[in-house]
Amino acid sequence: MVTESNGIRQHSARCGVGSWLGGGAATLRRVTSGLPVDDWHDDLDDLSLAIELADVAAAITMSAFGGRQQVTLKADETPVTEVDAAAERAMRALLAERRPHDGVRGEEGGATAGTSGRVWVIDPVDGTRMFAEGVPLWTTLIGLRVGDVGAPVVVGVADAPALGERYHAVKGQGAYRNGARIQVSTVDALTESFVLHAPLEEFGGAKGTGVDALHRVVDAARVTRGIGDAWAHLLVARGSAEALVEQGPCYEWDWAATSIIVTESGGTLTQLDGTPPEDGCHLLVSNGRVERQIRSAIDTGADVGADVGADVAAGGR
């Protein structure tokens, strides 16, 4: 159920959640094993809570969004506003009430250990620079991981409240945008691809891949745009773009929620070399059909056409 309150879109976490699963609500799995019965929760229950967390965050972020915000730099030189911190505190409070045995890992508050083996990975405002400038291309990210860092994410919600869009995925049940199923594109040639990329200054920075590498991708692609952060992940997941070349350092809270949305829509989310993401890395998000061509362009500038067949054979969908 969707309601409006003070201009903020609210999605009921207790009513109508099955519609968000796109008909998959009848197929539920225990996402925790080896725990007492009162410590496990099914996918629908966890998705319901993730939606509540998004609503709690939106009530805070949307009340402040619109004008330019004061930004401070953290120790890692990434930006933060008072709104980021307040929204994460509210999300953590809800998790402490509803899932006292689960762990939490957030961008602003760090890691809180749990005893269930389940960890909620949250980012109240992904795209803080956009948020602080009054640009609506920012998201709230909620992912549920079962196991240690690197273990699969089983539920993901990415909310873009300023745009009225919410994405979710449950492992094995597909990915959805505002309740409608989404899929990555079927384009299999980089020369026909719309490729997104991080800002130019990030490629040229001390930890960047290099401006020359970006130029090689730009030269090989049909068209490119400088759009990054989780919003760009979602554009790939829904088939609006074929790939994103993201510059780090990226951390688990940057990709936990979107990783399951991208993979459940048929795409891939990896480091630039194709290995699973890890803290501090750069990211390559793709439709699963052009990733090898992009890696070739980044690494060598070779003729990307030679990798078209390899991309499709390796898992193009």
Image (cartoon, grey):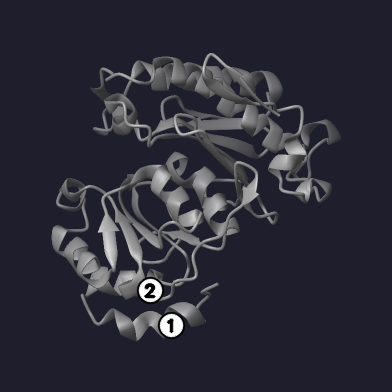
Task: Categorize mark 2 by other alpha carbons within 10 Å: few (<14), some (14-19), many (20+).
Answer: many
- Residue 102 can be seen, yes or no: no
**In x, y percent, where is residue 114?**
62, 30
Relative image position of residue 3 (x, y in whole percent): 64, 23
Mark 2 residue element: helix
Quadrant containing the N terminus in the rendered view: top right
Q: Position of residue 294 (x, y in %)?
A: 32, 69
Element on which disc 1 rests: helix
Query: Who's the residue at 77% across and 28% down the image?
Result: 15
Count of labels in the image? 2
Depth check, front residue: 88 or 32: 88
Label 2, on which residue? 292
Q: Which mark is residue 310?
A: 1
Residue 287's tag is none
Mark 1 neighbour density, 10 Å: few (under 14) some (14–19) many (20 or more): some
Q: Amino acid at mark 2?
A: Arg
Q: Nearer the viewer, residue 11 or 80?
A: 11
x 20%, y 69%: residue: 219
Sequence-wise, the earlier of marks 1 and 2 is 2
Which quarter of the picture shows residue 25?
Answer: top right
Q: Is residue 150 left or right of residue 70?
A: right
Do callouts 1 and 2 mark residues in contact (Cβ within 8 Å)? yes
In which quarter of the view is residue 77 placed? top left
**What separation in Å lies between label 1 and label 2 (alpha carbons)?**
7 Å
Q: Amino acid at mark 1?
A: Ala
Left or right of residue 78, residue 154 in this image: right
